[in-house]
Structures are given as structure tokens and as C-alpha cells.
Image: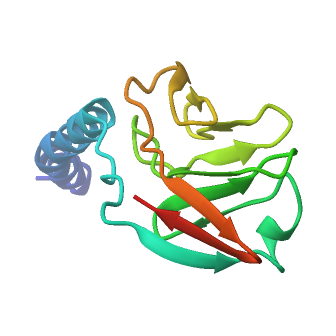
């Protein structure tokens, strides 16, 4: 066996071993994308935020905490929805000038109360209650 024949057979052997693994990896990445694995919406929620500083101190600001996006609308109202997009679990963002939420991963949009307004998501975000007492915002189930 010549040196060239040896390397050719070793290369072919490596390819024969690696191709099934590569194909399996591609198949599983496609299937996980189709499965839409998401983080479940938080339950038994009850926490308080100080709104005197940070993102919630001004209208149009938002933050993500405890698996929930808490937003202050341009009119000063507070919204709270589950952070995980129901399509694939990417954290959604609040868009103050549209008063809605969107997923930067695949473009799903949700109304201010978490209702799907544009796919690919097909399930709504869970909405939570908010109550403002002085400078403390309570977010609860």
C-alpha cells in the first residue's frame, strides 16, 4: 500500500464514521427547532419592584426579572407578561412606541396583554397583575 492509498483509506474511514454523527446532529437541531421547546411561564408569582430607579422609573422602560417582562407604558401604566416566547423560548422585548412585545429571534409579536398578534408563535404569553403603591410595584399571579 502506498502512502497515498493509506491516507485515502484513512480519510474514507473517518468520513464513514463522522457522516452519521453529522447527519444525526443536523436532524436533531432541525427537530428541536420544530418542537418549540420553551420555558414554562412562572407560576405563583408575587414580588415587588422599586420603580424610583432603573428602567421602570421612566415611561417606556422595561426589565426582565424572575422570568417576567415588566414594562411601563408611555402613558405610565405597568404591564407584566411571561418573558419566554411561546415559539422557542427567546426572551421577548417591550416596544414602547407600539405598546406591545416582540421576539427578536423569529419576529413573533404579542399585544400588551400577551395575546399573539403575529406568528410564528401560536400561544399567548401569560399575563400577570400589577399594583402600584407609592414607589413599589407588586407583580403577582
Relative vertical location of residue 9 with respect to residue 62 in this rendering, above or below: above
Position of 133 relative to 77 (above/below): below
Left/right placement of residue 55 relative to residue 78 reads right
Residue occupying the point 86% across, 36% down: 97
Q: In the orientation shown, which residue stands out farthest toward the top?
A: 118
Residue 111, x across and y down, in percent:
61, 30
Q: What percent of the width, then of the height, locates residue 128?
A: 48, 52
Report the quarter where the C terminus lies: bottom left
Residue 45 at x, y = what percent?
Answer: 39, 66
Residue at 30 percent across and 52 percent down: it is 40
Quarter of the figure with residue 99? top right
User: Which residue sits furthest front?
Assistant: 133
Camera-side residue of 104 and 19: 104
Q: How is the image coloured?
A: rainbow
Q: Residue at x 25, y 34 (%)?
A: 35
The structure residue drawn at horizontal position 80% and vertical position 68%, both measured from the top left corner, is 55
Q: Position of residue 93 (x, y in %)?
A: 66, 48
Describe residue 76's horizontal placement relative to residue 9 as left or right.
right
Q: How many marks?
A: 0
Q: Is residue 8 left or right of residue 134?
A: left
Amino acid at each position: 500500500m502506498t502512502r497515498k492509498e493509506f491516507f485515502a483509506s484513512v480519510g474514507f474511514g473517518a468520513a464513514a464514521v463522522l457522516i452519521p454523527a453529522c447527519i444525526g446532529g443536523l436532524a436533531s437541531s432541525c427537530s428541536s427547532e420544530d418542537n418549540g421547546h420553551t420555558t414554562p411561564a412562572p407560576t405563583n408569582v408575587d414580588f415587588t419592584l422599586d420603580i424610583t430607579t432603573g428602567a421602570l422609573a421612566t415611561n417606556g422602560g422595561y426589565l426582565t426579572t424572575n422570568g417576567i417582562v415588566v414594562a411601563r407604558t408611555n402613558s405610565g401604566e405597568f404591564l407584566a407578561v411571561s418573558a419566554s416566547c411561546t415559539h422557542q423560548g427567546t426572551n421577548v422585548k417591550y416596544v414602547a412606541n407600539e405598546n406591545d412585545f416582540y421576539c427578536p429571534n423569529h419576529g413573533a409579536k404579542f399585544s400588551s396583554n400577551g395575546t399573539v398578534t403575529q406568528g410564528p408563535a401560536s400561544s399567548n404569553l401569560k399575563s400577570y397583575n400589577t399594583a402600584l403603591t407609592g414607589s413599589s410595584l407588586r407583580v403577582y399571579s
